[in-house]
Amino acid sequence: MFIRRLQRFLQLDYAVGVLLIIAAVLAIIAANSPLSGYYNWLLDVPIRLSIGALDIHKPALLWINDGLMALFFLLIGLEVKQEVIEGDLNSPAKVALPGIAAVGGMVVPALIYVAFNYDDPARLKGWAIPAATDIAFAIGILALLGNKVPSSLKVFLLALAILDDLGAIIIIALFYTADLSVMSMLIGSVLLGILIIFNRCGVTRLSPYLIVGTLLWVCVLKSGVHATLAGVLTALTIPLNATDQKGRSPLKTLKNALHKNVYFFILPIFAFTNAGIMLSIEQFKSLADPVPLGILIGLFLGKQIGVFSFCWVAVKAGLARLPAHSSWRQMYGLSILCGIGFTMSLFIGSLAFTETDINPIISDRIGILVGSLISAIVGYVVLYRAGRHCHSAKKEP
C-alpha cells in the first residue's frame, strides 16, 4: 500500500518541489540539533580517486557539487537542445517573450545586489546569486494551482526557466572560473571535438558519448572552468533526430533515463548538503547585512520587477504576445514565482565565495532561503487569487 502511494506521489508534477522542501528542512534540522557534528562530518568526508597520474581528492560536498550536479547540467543541456530544435523554443516568435523575461529576470536582480555590495570586491562576487530561477520549485508551485493557471502559462514558465538556466551556465563559464590550465583545456577541446565527430558521423549508441563525456568532465574539472559545464557540452553533441537500432532517439533516451534520477535523487541530495544553516537570532539579524539583503531583495523584488516589466514593454511594443488565455495579474504572480532561486542560487553561491573570507553559510544561504520562501508563498497567493478572479469573470453573463 505504501509503495503504491509513493509511486503515485512521485508521478505528481509538484512531487520534486515537495522533496526539495523536505531535504532542505532535514538539512536545517540536522544543522541545528545534536546531529550537527555528524552532518558537518558527512560533508567533509574526503573521497579520493586515483588512476595513474590522475588524482582527484575532494570532500564529499564538492563531489556532489562538481560531480552529481554535472548530471543535472547534462539534463538541462538535453532539455535546451530538444526545446530549441523541436519544442517551445524552436522559432523566434516562441522564444521572444520568455527570452526577454529571462533577461529581465537576470539583469535587475543582479543590479539590485550590486547596489548593496558595490563597495566591496569580495562581496561583489555574489552578484549572480539572485539571477537564477529554480525550475523544479517554480514548476512544482505552479502545479499545485492546477487548472487555476492556463497551460500556456506553464509552458511559458518552463521556457523562461530553461533560458534562465542557460544564462546561469554562461555566467558560470565566464565569471566563476579559477586559474586556467592550458593543457587540461587543450585535452578537453580534443575530447569535445571527438564528441562532435561522433555526432557528425551518425554514432547513435550512448556509451561512446558517455565515456568521452566523463573524460571531458575530468579535463574541465582540472582546467579551472567549473566541471558541471562538461555536462552541458556533452549534451549538445548527443543526437536528437537520429535513431538507434531500436528506433529510439539517443537524446530522448538519455533524457528519460536521467530525469527521475536527477530530480528525485541528485537534487534532493544537493539540497540536503547545501541548505544546512544554523538558525539563531544572529542569523536573522544578519539579513540586514549587504550580502543576504541584496540576495533577498534581488530574488523577491528584483525578479518580479525584471520579469514583469520586460514582459510588459515587450508586449506593448509589439515584440511579443501574452501567453494564450492568461492575464496580466497571472503574469505578475508568475514573475514573483521566478524569485524562487534555491538550487541554482545555492550552487552559484557555493562558487562565488569559495576563495574569499566571507562565510557563505552566514552571507548567502539565509538570504537565498528567505527570499525563495517569500517568493514561493506570495507568488502562489497572487496566482491563486488571479485564477479565481479569471474564473469568476468567465461565469459572469
Image: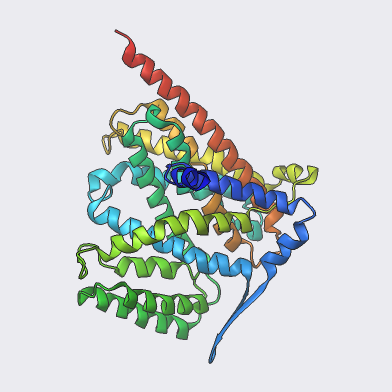
Picture quadrant where residue 43 is located: bottom right
Residue at figure coordinates x 58%, y 63% from the top left? 351
Residue at 33% x, 28% y: name it.
326
Quadrant holding the C terminus: top left
Which quarter of the picture shows residue 62? bottom right
In the image, residue 251 lies at what x, y percent? 29, 63
Residue 313 spot, x, y in % from top left: 35, 35
Residue 73 higher or lower than 389, as above or below: below
Relative vertical location of residue 9 with respect to residue 252 in this rendering, above or below: above
Placement of 162 over or under 299, stated as above or below = below
Taking depth in this image into account, of 180 and 229 the one nearest to the observer is 229
Q: Residue at x 31, y 31 (%)?
A: 316
Residue 312 shows in this picture: yes
Residue at the outermost front position: 1
Q: Nearer the viewer, residue 51 or 159?
A: 51
Does residue 384 appear to the left or right of 195 in the view shown? right
Q: Nearer the viewer, residue 204 or 85?
A: 204
Question: x, y (%) of residue 345?
Answer: 55, 52
Specify how the rendered protein is coloured: rainbow
Regarding residue 128, the answer to whether it shows in the image is: no
Q: Residue furthest bottom?
A: 52
The answer to whether 72 appears left or right of 290 in the picture is left
